[in-house]
């Protein structure tokens, strides 16, 4: 990924060892493309850009791209060097499009197509941005990228990604859930569900999938890094994101999890008012 502060044009050359072809090195050179448009003084953008930078490097360092290229080149032993290069580049784009789609919560192909066309950053990450524009990102192209690898191959890629991240148990679930979300979107009229019910089901799947990177990161910090995760960053419940840590100071139960319900009682013992705090309640409302 390019530092947005840099000017002019750039290209990227990487050499991938492909054991399927007598251990020859395949040189993959991207087309010349312009520097990213700077977006100064926007913290949220900077954080998201850094996240993509980290994932970009992670895909290379973990050799996940090499694994994807091996899969893409299987059965292409007789192809010439140019065909192998194009096939390998397509495999890289397919991997990155699916990783991005997974990162964004398993959004639809149409939505991802729109995002790729409207974001230099996302298009650059997926290697579909060139000097003459962002190419090959129609809905049908995005769908072909997503279905380029077989389900078994995607399981292997997700397994590699999650194993390196320290949580392999989520790999099969993620692939299974997102593939079923796609099938439901395509075939929902053949089910007994209404359109509204299908929308709710897909939204729940997307919401769960969107939290997986944060869940992996939290598990890695606590179990592998043995570091405390600040309360503000903790995921206490994937189903109820509004849940908070409540310090009660009770004997044997210093901390509880949930939301604070304030009840106002009259002298006669009747409830006269109440308030449920979706956010963390102010200290003055906490009774002993």
Image (cartoon, rainbow, N blue to C red):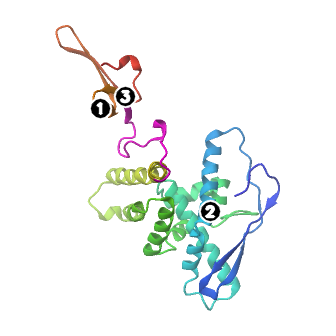
Q: Nearer the viewer, residue 101 or 213?
A: 213
Is most of the magenta stretch helix, strand or loop? loop
Tag 2 residue: 126
- Mark 3 burial class by Cα count in 10 Å: few <14, some 14-19, many 20+: few
The CA span between labels 2 and 3 is 45 Å
Left or right: 130 as drawn, with respect to 92: right
* Above-or-below relation of 44 to 254: below
Residue 123 in the image, given as x and y percentages of width and height: 64, 59
Of callouts 2 and 1, which one flags the residue occurring earlier in the amino acid sequence? 2
Residue pictured at 69% horizontal, 81% vertical = 25
* Above-or-below relation of 250 to 212: above
Tag 3 residue: 247
Of callouts 1 and 3, which one flags the residue occurring earlier in the amino acid sequence? 3
Tag 1 residue: 253
Q: Nearer the viewer, residue 225 or 85?
A: 225
Local secondary structure at mark 3: strand
The reply to whether dot 2 and dot 1 touch (C-beta < 8 Å) is: no
Residue pictured at 39% horizontal, 24% vertical = 281
Residues in magenta, as a range: 224-247
Quadrant location of the N terminus?
A: bottom right
């Amino acid at each position: 990924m390019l530092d947005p502060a840099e000017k002019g044009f750039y290209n990227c050359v990487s050499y991938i060892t492909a054991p399927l072809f007598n251990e020859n090195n395949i040189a993959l050179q991207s087309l010349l493309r312009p520097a990213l448009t700077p977006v100064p003084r926007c913290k949220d953008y900077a954080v998201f850009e850094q996240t993509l930078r980290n994932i970009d490097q992670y895909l290379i360092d973990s050799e996940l791209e090499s694994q994807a290229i091996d899969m893409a080149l299987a059965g292409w032993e007789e192809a010439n060097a140019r065909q192998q290069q194009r096939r390998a580049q397509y495999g890289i784009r397919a991997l990155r499009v699916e990783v991005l789609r997974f990162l964004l919560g398993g959004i639809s192909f149409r939505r991802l197509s729109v995002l790729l066309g409207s974001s230099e950053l996302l298009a650059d990450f997926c290697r579909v941005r060139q000097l003459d524009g962002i190419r090959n990102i129609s809905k049908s192209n995005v769908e072909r990228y997503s279905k380029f690898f077989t389900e078994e191959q995607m399981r292997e890629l997700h397994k590699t990604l999650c194993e390196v991240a320290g949580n392999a148990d989520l790999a099969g679930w993620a692939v299974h859930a997102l593939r079923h979300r796609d099938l439901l979107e395509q075939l929902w009229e053949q089910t007994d569900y209404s359109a509204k019910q299908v929308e709710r089901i897909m939204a729940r799947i997307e919401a769960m999938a969107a939290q997986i990177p944060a869940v992996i990161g939290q598990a890695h910090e606590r179990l592998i890094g043995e570091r405390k995760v600040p309360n503000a960053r903790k995921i206490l419940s994937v189903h109820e994101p509004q849940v908070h840590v409540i310090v009660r100071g009770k004997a044997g139960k210093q901390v509880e999890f949930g939301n604070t319900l304030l009840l106002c009682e009259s002298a006669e013992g009747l409830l006269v008012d109440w308030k449920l705090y979706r956010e963390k309640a102010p200290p003055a409302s906490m009774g002993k």
